Amino acid sequence: MAKNVYGLDLGSYEIKVYDKKSDTIWKEKNVIAIKEDREIFAVGDQAYEMYEKTPPDIQVQFPMENGVISRFNDMQYLLQNLLKKERHFARGSAYVIAVPTDVTEVEKKAFFDLVVHSTARAREVNIVERGIADAIGLNLDVENTKGLFIVNFGGATTELSIIAGGGLVLNQLLKVGGSDLDQAVAQLVRYNHDFLIGHQTAETLRRNFGVFSDDDNAVMTAAGRDLITGIPQRREISINLVRAAVKEPLEQCVQAIMALMDRTPPEIRKSIRRNGIFLTGGVANLPGLELYLEEMTGIRTHTAIDPDICAVTGLKNIIGSKDLKKLAYSMIEDNYRWMR
Ligand SMILES: Nc1ncnc2c1ncn2[C@@H]1O[C@H](COP(=O)(O)OP(=O)(O)OP(=O)(O)O)[C@@H](O)[C@H]1O
Ligand SMILES: [Mg+2]
């Protein structure tokens, strides 16, 4: 018997973990701070606090990029440190990991290797396609559905999944996420006001203003630096500017949703129109996003209750249920199709 079971949803922005023993879900920023290129200085939320505020000898890095692990050793170190951090981490545990579907087999296997080839000495590792984990987290009937469309809006990616008859029919990973919205906000602020703001300021503006709300004349004061004089200042940024900025990357997502609908077999498409689109991922919290997507796609849209932890909640349900266990599979089994 494994000592404990962990469900992992590793995001480019945040790591989400389900710990079976304590029956809890926790999350922490997927960030590591390194001093002088060698020494690990801080991990997780603590490292994120230093983002854009550190002296030049401390580098703050994100071990994942566009939904896949780009710095394997950092990711491994970070994960193990977070698991150990006052959390009664047990070696020889079992892991169920949510993975993106539309990536290469090598990228997918890196999630598996992360805990297999490490001091964690994983006893068993299974993976679940993230679209499926999200559907289970939403309490949808994956087994019997005739058509579901799930959109996971994450920090760096947006994953589109179409599910029917117990499995994924189509899946696409877009390289557009919350950080692209933030970048669009920072760029437009710079262009319009000759004013430089950081990622975190842009994120705060975007999270507050969203895509739609009642108050169209709102302004928010943001800290930044005047591009011409170089002097740090605070300026008022209007809601309309922020919204104009976020709409551009969001339109790319809408186009991809419509294009994937076009590629979907008609029967499945009909069910999706009936069931609606389901939104998960942290960006699904964005005020007005649901309404915006409904207007742009003409399809009813529902947002998960806690969208950022929807996939890991799905893993929790899979870990806890005999019926759902078949949705998880090992990458070392004979029947796993390599290079699908
Ligand atoms: N209340 C909120 N309003 C708007 N955006 C939010 C809110 N909460 C979180 N976000 C955004 O959600 C994003 C993180 O979402 P999530 O945790 O799903 O990403 P991730 O899984 O780490 O990334 P990815 O799936 O792309 O690898 C961030 O861009 C963050 O700004
Ligand atoms: Mg994610």
Image (cartoon, grey):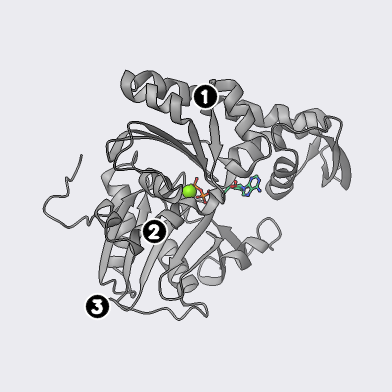
Q: Is residue 18 left or right of residue 267?
A: right
Q: Residue at x 39, y 58 (%)?
A: 317
Q: Residue at x 49, y 51 (%)?
A: 310
Categorize mark 1 by other alpha carbons within 10 Å: few (<14), some (14-19), many (20+).
Answer: some
Residue 1 numbered tag: 3
Kind of residue at disc 2: Asn
Q: Position of residue 297 (x, y in %)?
A: 53, 22
Whichever of labels 1 and 3 marks the residue nearer the N terminus, that label is: 3
Closer-to-camera residue (61/134): 134
In which quadrant is the C terminus drawn? top left
Q: Is residue 278 left or right of residue 108?
A: right
Q: CA distance from mark 2 to mark 1?
A: 28 Å
Categorize mark 2 by other alpha carbons within 10 Å: few (<14), some (14-19), many (20+).
Answer: some
Q: Quadrant of residue 116?
A: bottom left
Q: Where does label 1 land, which residue?
A: 299
Q: Is residue 150 left or right of residue 326?
A: right
In which quadrant is the N terminus drawn? bottom left
Closer-to-camera residue (175/311): 311
* Label 1: element kind: loop
